[in-house]
Every structure is written in structure tokens, then in C-alpha cells.
Amino acid sequence: MEKKKYPIGPENYVLYEEIGQGATASVHRALCVPLNEIVAIKILDFERDNIDLRNISREVQTMILVDHPNVLKSHCSFVSDHNLWVVMPYMSGGSFLHIMKAAYPDGFEELVIATILREVLKGIVYLHHQGHIHRDVKAGNILVDGRGEVKLGDFGVSACLFDSGDRQRTRNTFVGTPCWYACLQESAHNRFLILF
Ligand SMILES: Nc1ncnc2c1ncn2[C@@H]1O[C@H](COP(=O)(O)OP(=O)(O)OP(=O)(O)O)[C@@H](O)[C@H]1O
């Protein structure tokens, strides 16, 4: 089957509402006009103060290259004015953090957690086989689409085991989300599952 080609250039997309706001980017639901398909577009502003171009370029490269049902990939990306647009599949259920906040303030049942984690772990195993470490696995970065498919996203602080020089060394440093890092360290001896 021929692979769908997602067009490059903002004129091919109609931006709808903002569906997410991260530290460095905003994410919009959008229509890809030539394909008549709903997508999500992450827009990063190069002129923002806290922008780290190396991280961004690695995130985009990783998202273009990955190909696994449990890893959020990018269809294409392009620069428009001082913004980088990253076009991705639209995950209409949002993140598990949002779902918990909205409907499950006491957390999910264990069976649900196990089901979600099984999918996430398949994605992580795939990433590790490709030489990538995600380094920021958390509920806010685990997304679900309209068919219930679970994907791990946000490669903003990921690293590649095949990098050399400076980047090799930086993997000994702390990255990610502080409380999750602490929780993971702690629960490595217990059960990772309770974190959700
Ligand atoms: N493909 C998508 N479909 C639907 N919602 C998405 C998609 N990608 C991201 N989002 C939403 O946007 C939010 C922010 O996205 P993302 O985590 O990629 O941005 P970020 O700036 O890298 O965030 P962070 O502050 O965690 O580094 C996510 O938590 C999620 O709610």
C-alpha cells in the first residue's frame, strides 16, 4: 500500500482549537485540507526564551523516524516564519493525565493501569531497540486516540544511545519531570503501576 503523503506548508492546514500547552509548544487540532484528515499540530516558537534548538531537532528527527503503533510519530514537519510545525496523528482522547484529572481523580483501577502500561511498555521496548531512551515517561505524555490506541509521545528530552561526544555525557544528567523521576527511583523496588 502506498504511504500517505502529508503536505508541507501552513496553507495546507486549517488550525482549530488549542488542545494542549507544554513548556515549549502549543498543540492544535487541525484539518489537513488535501487529505481531508484531522491531525494534531505542535507549534514551537523559535523566538521563545526557553527554546533549545538541539532538543527540538532531536525530538522532530525521532518522531519522523519512529514507526510503532504505541509511539506517537510525526507525519511531517516544516518551518513557517519563526515557528516549527510538527504534524502528528490526532489523539482525540488526550493524555491520561487529562483523563484522570477530568474523570478519575482517585486514579485508575489496577486492571486499567496494567492495560495502559502494557501498551506503553511495548512502545518503550521498541524505542530501546532503536537505541532511544525517552526519559520523560509520565501520564501527561501517554495519549489515547478515538479507537483506544495508546501512544507514548513527547520526545523533548529523549536521547539516542548512538550519540557521541557531548551528548553521550549528558545522559548521566537529570532530565524529565522532577517528581516523576523521584517516584520512579523510589518505586523501582516496588511497583511502577501505582504511579498512575
Ligand atoms: N497528537 C496529539 N493529539 C492530541 N493531543 C496532543 C497531541 N500531542 C500533544 N497533545 C496534547 O498537548 C499536550 C502538550 O504536548 P507536548 O507534551 O508534546 O508538549 P511539550 O511542550 O513538549 O510538553 P512538556 O511541557 O511536557 O515538555 C499534551 O499533554 C497533550 O495533552
Image (spheres, grey):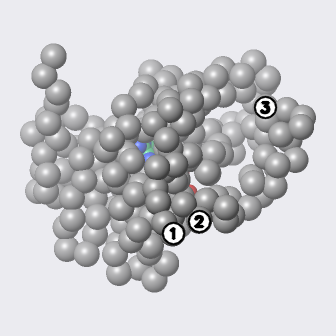
Q: Residue 179 carries which label?
A: none
Percent x, y of residue 62: 39, 47
Please tell me whether mark 2 sits on a helix, a strand or a loop: helix
Amino acid type for the residue under numbered disc 2: Thr
Q: According to the image, label 3 marks what residue?
A: 193
Q: Which residue is tagged 1?
A: 166
Q: Can residue 174 be seen at all in this image of the molecule?
A: yes
Image location (x, y in percent) of residue 119? 58, 24
Q: How far apart are marks 3 and 1 (CA)?
A: 34 Å
Residue drawn at (46%, 49%) of the image: 162
Q: In this view, does 62 lie to the left or right of 14?
A: right
Amino acid at circle 1: Asp
Label 1, label 2: how far apart the Cα atoms are: 6 Å
Residue 32 sits in quarter: top left
Q: What element carries label 3?
A: helix
Residue type at mark 3 is Leu
- Residue drawn at 45 percent across, 83 percent down: 49
State whether residue 96 is above or below residue 12. Answer: above
Circle 2 is placed at which residue position?
170
Q: Earlier in the sequence, mark 3 or mark 1?
A: 1
Give me the C-alpha separation between circle 3 and circle 2. 28 Å
Q: Is residue 112 left or right of residue 74?
A: right
Q: Residue at x 17, y 41 (%)?
A: 6
Q: How crowded is mark 2: few (under 14 residues within 10 Å), some or many (20 or more)?
A: few
Q: What quarter of the picture does the N terminus occupy?
A: top left
Q: For the C terminus, give its image quadrant.
A: top right
